[in-house]
Amino acid sequence: MSKLLGGWSMSLTRYPFNEFDYIMYGMVTNLEGLTTESETDQGWSPENESKPENNPCFIGKRLWVYGGGGCSPEGKPSSINDVSRIISATMNKGWDGVDFDDECNMNIKFVIETMKKLKDNNKETSFGFIAGYSYNHPCTEKGQEINDKVKSIITSGQCNRLVHYCYATAMWNQDDIINNVKQALEQSISYGMDRDKIVLALTTRGLTDWNLNYFLNQIINLNLGGLFIWRYDEMTPNHLKIIKKRLNK
């Protein structure tokens, strides 16, 4: 059976791969102004930009990303007004849904409320988080916080896909991968997340045959939903060939 394949793009003009099921555009890191970049140096906004139709061969779905590395301020969305802006941007500009990238301590109560309203309007949702040491050690303060958030997302039943970021600016080293990737995925399964809704994510920075196949092994052996790729435009033809073959794309 074919697995999901997708990726993220900072540029609205970048073509998704034809084999992608999802492409996510962003990152909308200025959460107060709902734009990319920052509050003082604003980029594009999903309130003003329609869902890109830049590849006629792509039949997948296009989401915009709420959050991302360096997103601010913390605790967003923080009100019903914030929720309404996210819903309106998605509906008015034809987006297929929203990918929540929680790298700035988001307010999970309002994230879930937004997801519910999006699903009520037949839009898709995903929630991504760094699934490393802290997630695998819930006894630590940060670990407990992340685990509590993920449990809330899972039990809400409002999230289409739970995305596990198992990388940093580049792929983790071999020890960190062996000690964290499979364990994080199994943690989410133990909390009741459907396996076909669990997505593993990697970056092309530092990607090797070994770590790529290790990630693919987890997706196949644990029967997970699929793979999302950061900086997919930098992927080598050989690595794309391996992914397509092993995920039946």
Image (tube, grey):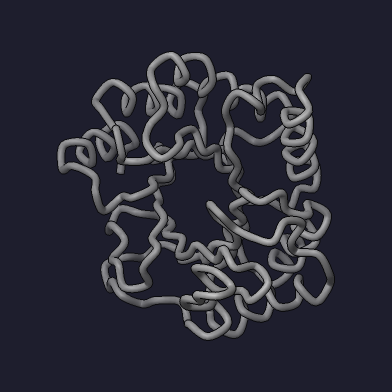
Q: Is residue 115 above or below residue 69?
A: below
Which residue appears at 70% of the width and 78% of the height?
85
Q: Is residue 81 above or below residue 101?
A: below
The location of residue 133, given as percent across then percent down, is 60, 23
The location of residue 60, given as percent across then percent down, is 41, 62
The location of residue 210, given as percent across then percent down, is 28, 20
24 with respect to 244 (left or right): right
Question: What is the total number of numbered labels drawn onto the structure image?
Answer: 0
Which residue in the rendered view is the most extreme toward the left?
A: 237
Q: Quadrant of residue 84?
A: bottom right
113 with respect to 235 (left or right): right
- Image quarter in which the N terminus is found: top left
- Image quarter in which the C terminus is found: top left
Which residue appears at 60% of the width and 75% of the height?
90
Which residue appears at 38% of the width and 28% of the height?
216
Work out whether residue 193 or residue 167 is closer to the camera in this orientation and state it. Answer: 167
The location of residue 136, given as percent across then percent down, is 65, 22
Which residue in the rendered view is the most extreme toward the front?
A: 40
Q: Quadrant of residue 163?
A: top right
118 with respect to 162 (left or right): right
73 with respect to 243 (left or right): right
Q: Is residue 178 above or below residue 216?
A: above
